[in-house]
């Protein structure tokens, strides 16, 4: 049988409601594997009526003198087996998809918990750092350098002509036996609205005394009458 005959298209009746297209080669292969019976009806273009596989054995190149080792399975058994295999495949696919969805959900929950844990830990560490920095004190354990500068600014701005225009150039604080000394320079407006620089030195008392102003020294024209009295 030549290649063209092997590729001939046939319609194979597996059941009253089940008809499938197959080539001559596929029919021979299915018969050898006992998937088709000699009574299986076949039809191809050019035929007036259906014929059984046994009737078309010569055209199909099938040897029917010697029966197969085992009788071919009936079409009903073949259809049942195919449906059973399809159902098993569907169930296996559904099980795999269910496992994937479950793993995806678990992975999502674990990832969210891990992210929250990292953020909480970072926030806790940040709070500790901020707390340590905000509460650091000087050697005396009373008022820290930052607190000393803040109190000094209160006294400073009360002695300026225009405290709203103040711009601190630099300032430094040092602890003394009697408290703190804060010194530096600032720019602010004078009576004529011109920006002038004033140098200052503020002596504060200790924390236990309420940080009183001991004395203040100014060098500049940005101070008011109170500041001039303290010079």
Image (spheres, grey):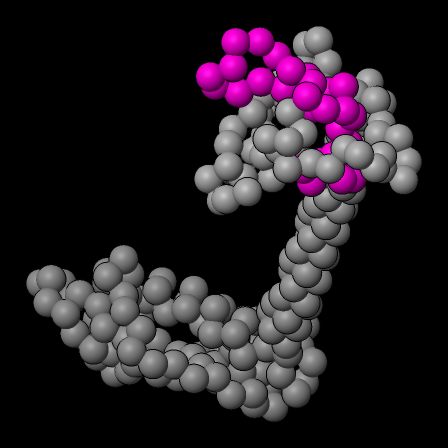
Q: Is residue 106 above or below residue 115?
A: above
- Name the residue: 56% across, 90% down: 176
Is 31 in front, or is 160? 31
Left or right of 47 on screen, residue 209: right
| Residue 10 position within the rendered picture, expressed as x and y whole percent measured from the top left | 56, 25
- Name the residue: 54% across, 39% down: 6
Report which quarter residue 169 is drawn in.
bottom left
Q: Is residue 15 above or below residue 104?
A: above
Examine the rendering and report whether any part of residue 124 can be seen.
Answer: no
Examine the rendering and report whether any part of residue 142 can be seen.
Answer: yes
Q: Which residues are magenta?
A: 28-55
| Residue 94 position within the rendered picture, expressed as x and y whole percent measured from the top left | 75, 33
Q: Is residue 47 magenta?
A: yes
| Residue 72 position within the rendered picture, expressed as x and y whole percent measured from the top left | 84, 30
Q: Is residue 135 magenta?
A: no
Left or right of 18 on screen, residue 230: left
Is 109 in front, or is 92? 92
- Quadrant where the C terminus sits is bottom left
- Name the residue: 27% across, 66% down: 166
- Name the residue: 56% across, 33% down: 23
Magenta segment's dominant SS is loop
- Quadrant where the N terminus sits is top right
Is 15 in front, or is 144? 15
Left or right of 85 on screen, residue 62: left
| Residue 123 position within the rendered picture, expressed as x and y whole percent measured from the top left | 65, 60
């Amino acid at each position: 049988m030549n290649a063209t005959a092997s590729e001939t298209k046939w319609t194979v009746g597996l059941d009253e409601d089940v008809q499938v297209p197959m080539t001559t080669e596929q029919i021979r292969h299915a018969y050898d594997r006992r998937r088709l019976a000699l009574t299986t009806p076949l039809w191809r273009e050019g035929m007036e009526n259906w014929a059984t596989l046994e009737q078309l054995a010569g055209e199909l190149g099938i040897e029917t003198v010697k029966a197969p080792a085992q009788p071919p399975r009936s079409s009903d058994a073949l259809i049942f087996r195919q449906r059973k295999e399809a159902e098993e495949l569907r169930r296996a696919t559904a099980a795999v998809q269910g496992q994937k969805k479950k793993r995806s959900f678990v992975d999502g929950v674990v990832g969210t918990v891990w992210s929250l844990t990292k953020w909480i830990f970072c926030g806790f560490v940040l709070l500790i750092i901020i707390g340590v920095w905000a509460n650091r004190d000087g050697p005396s354990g009373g008022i820290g350098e930052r607190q000393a500068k803040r109190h000094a600014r209160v006294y400073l701005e009360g002695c300026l002509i225009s405290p709203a225009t103040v711009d601190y150039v630099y300032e430094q604080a040092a602890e003394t036996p009697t408290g703190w000394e804060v010194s530096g320079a600032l720019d602010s407006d004078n009576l004529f609205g011109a920006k002038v620089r004033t140098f200052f030195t503020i002596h504060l008392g200790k924390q236990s005394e309420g940080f009183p102003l001991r004395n203040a020294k100014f060098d500049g024209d940005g101070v008011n009458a109170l500041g001039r009295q303290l010079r």
